[in-house]
Structure formats: structure tokens, C-alpha cells
Image: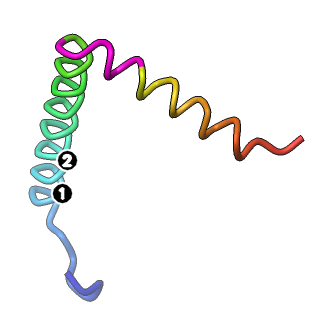
Amino acid sequence: MDGSEQWTEEEVRDRLRRRAAFLRDLAEARELRRRVAPRRSRRAQIHATLRRRTFRTE
């Protein structure tokens, strides 16, 4: 939509419903990946922590 069109209330509800379902599926997939490959998951957490520390300003 280019901004000039208005969404109906039903379209907005449908979009939010589909988005919620997508986010639930995404969270489920991430949890499954974490359980299936704990070593890789732990490594990713360590790298994320290091990246956060890199950009910390004090």
C-alpha cells in the first residue's frame, strides 16, 4: 500500500493474526534449534554477548 489507501478493520485484524502466528512459529523454531544444537546455540550467545560489549560506551 502506498499510504493513500486505508485498511479496513478486518484487514488489520487479519494482518495482526497472521503476524502473531508467524512470530509464534519463529519463536518455536528458535527454541527447537536451541534444543537440537545446544553447542551452536551457546556459541551464538557468547558471540552476541561479545558484540554487545564491543559497542558499549562508558
Q: Quadrant of residue 32?
A: top left
> In the image, is residue 37 part of the stretch drawn in magenta?
yes
Circles 2 and 1: CB atoms closer than 8 Å: yes
Q: Quadrant of residue 44?
A: top left
- Locate residue 30, reporting x and y percent: 24, 26
- The residue drawn where x is 61% and y is 33% is 50
Which amino acid lies under the numbered mark 2 shown in the image of this protein? Leu
Which amino acid lies under the numbered mark 1 shown in the image of this protein? Val
Q: Nearer the viewer, residue 29 or 51?
A: 51
Give the residue pinned by disc 1. Answer: 12
Distance from the alpha carbon under mark 2 to that under mark 1: 6 Å
Magenta region: 36-42
- Circle 2 SS class: helix
Q: Nearer the viewer, residue 11 or 1?
A: 1
Say whether residue 46 is left or right of residue 22. right
Say whether residue 54 is left or right of residue 8. right
Say whether residue 44 is left or right of residue 8. right
Q: Residues within 10 Å of mark 1 (few under 14, many from 20)?
A: few
Q: Say how many tags the image has.
A: 2
- The residue drawn where x is 10% and y is 56% is 10
Q: Nearer the viewer, residue 2 or 4?
A: 2
- Locate residue 9, reporting x and y percent: 16, 58
Magenta stretch prevailing secondary structure: helix
- The residue drawn where x is 76% and y is 41% is 56
Picture quarter with the C terminus: top right
Picture quarter with the N terminus: bottom left
- Circle 1 SS class: helix
Position above or below: 38 against 53: above
- Locate residue 2, reporting x and y percent: 24, 86
Position above or below: 43 against 58: above
- The residue drawn where x is 13% and y is 36% is 21
Give the residue pinned by disc 2. Answer: 16
